Amino acid sequence: MTYLWLKAGHVTFVIFWMAGLFMLPRFFVYHQEAEPGSAEEARWIDRERRLLRIILWPAMGVTWALGLALAFSIGAFTQPWFHAKLGLVLILSAYNVWMAGYAADLAQGRRRLEGKRLRILNEVPGIATVLIAIMVIVKPF
């Protein structure tokens, strides 16, 4: 029964985390379209900070905690599919950290990327999700 509760919690917090990972790059696009120093830009800075603080960081942390507990409970650390999944989750975690850094840059007025590049980067979590689902459900190796 513990396994099922861990799994339910893990899936729930993965959904929260993924929602944030999809939203933040879109926020960046809109933020960069706002006039520097405007009230609109200030609102985007606030939205980005809140999304990171209230959703992304907590959801990522709980996802990791429950995911590791699940992995221990089923002995996944000896399975090749799990190593691939873990690598993909590490990439998503690095992406989360990068986005937090980019949010800080935007808050300081540094707009290093174009909207088109941010829209392309928004595909990272989607691709990772597809690959993770395949690893967990199909277990191809």
Image (spheres, rainbow, N blue to C red):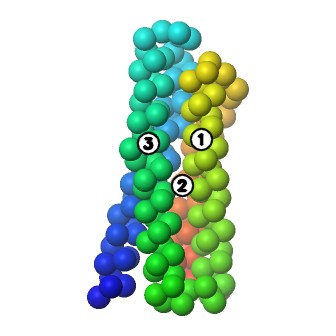
Instruction: Say which label, 1 or 2, has the lower sequence index.
Output: 1
Residue 53 numbered tag:
3
Cβ–Cβ below 8 Å for labels 1 and 2?
Answer: no
- Say which element carries label 3: helix
Residue with the mark numbered 2: 126
Instruction: Say which label, 1 or 3, has the lower sequence index.
Output: 3
Task: Please name the residue shown 61% across and 85% down the image.
Answer: 77
47 displayed left or right of 112: left
Residue 28 numbered tag:
none
106 displayed left or right of 64: right
Residue 99 numbered tag:
1
Q: CA distance from mark 1 to mark 3?
A: 12 Å
Mark 1 against mark 2, which lies toward the viewer?
1
Task: Please name the residue shown 48% across and 89% down the image.
Answer: 74
The residue type indicated by label 3 comes to Arg
Q: Residues within 10 Å of mark 1 (few under 14, many from 20)?
A: some
Q: Residues within 10 Å of mark 3 (few under 14, many from 20)?
A: few
Residue 36 position in % (x across, y down)? 56, 11
Task: Please name the residue shown 55% across and 69% down the image.
Answer: 132
- Say which element carries label 2: helix
Q: Residues within 10 Å of mark 2 (few under 14, many from 20)?
A: some
Cβ–Cβ below 8 Å for labels 2 and 3?
Answer: no
Cβ–Cβ below 8 Å for labels 1 and 3?
Answer: no
